[in-house]
Amino acid sequence: MSFGRIAVLGLVGLAVAGCGRRHDDLYAWMDEVRATEKVTIEPLPVIEPYEPFVYARDGLKDPFLDTLKERRTETVAAGAGEGPRPDLNRRKEALEAYPLDALRMVGTLSRGGAMWALIQAPDQTISRVGVGNYMGENYGRVTHVGPTAVQLVELIPNGTGGWMERQASVAIVEQ
């Protein structure tokens, strides 16, 4: 036999002999630790049962009521005196959903002496607006369409239950 084989067989023998050794001191230490350390586990929290809420309308406010619409109606009813007031029975136009400062005039169209403004809404839709159309959140009625601006009259609450007119305009935006 060669020296290399004898060395390899010797190392294998030593490894096998080392695995067979009993580790009594290690097992004794593990038994001691197990006996002295007590692990306490906290109990699970008590889960309270779900109690559903039954909504009874008796004397409570309707959560689905549009309070802004209700206030506008109350304000118009309170200001039943003379002066301008919005027509709340009129069907709202698409551009009345946006404030005036969110609307942009991007051009004009004219035909047969009539002129319309092209107004771009924040959702990038473009609407044609002429005299008599409405736009803006304050009941703004278009009174004049010019080549560079749209003039309109808004109705705003005057603080005493009535309404007052305010002049406003939307000018063309240069790009």
Image (cartoon, rainbow, N blue to C red):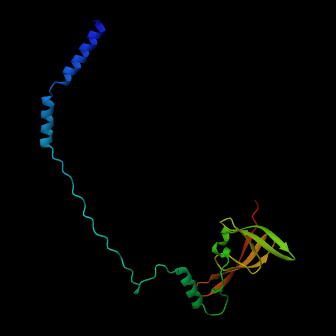
Point out residue 115 in the picture as x, y percentages from the top left corner.
82, 75
- Relative placement, left or right, of 40 versus 150 is left
42, 164: nearer the viewer: 42
Point out residue 79 in the picture as x, y percentages from the top left corner.
60, 90
- Relative placement, left or right, of 82 versus 25 is right
Regarding residue 118, the answer to whether it shows in the image is: yes
7, 71: nearer the viewer: 7
Point out residue 113 in the picture as x, y percentages from the top left corner.
87, 77
Q: Farthest residue toward the bottom?
A: 81
- Relative placement, left or right, of 3 versus 155 is left
- Relative placement, left or right, of 67 versus 47 is right
Q: Is residue 148 above or below residue 45?
A: below
Residue at image location 18% in from the left, 48% down from the top: 39
Q: Farthest residue toward the front?
A: 1
Residue at image location 37% in from the left, 79% down from the top: 54
Residue 92: image quadrant is bottom right
Residue at image location 28% in from the left, 13% down from the top: 8
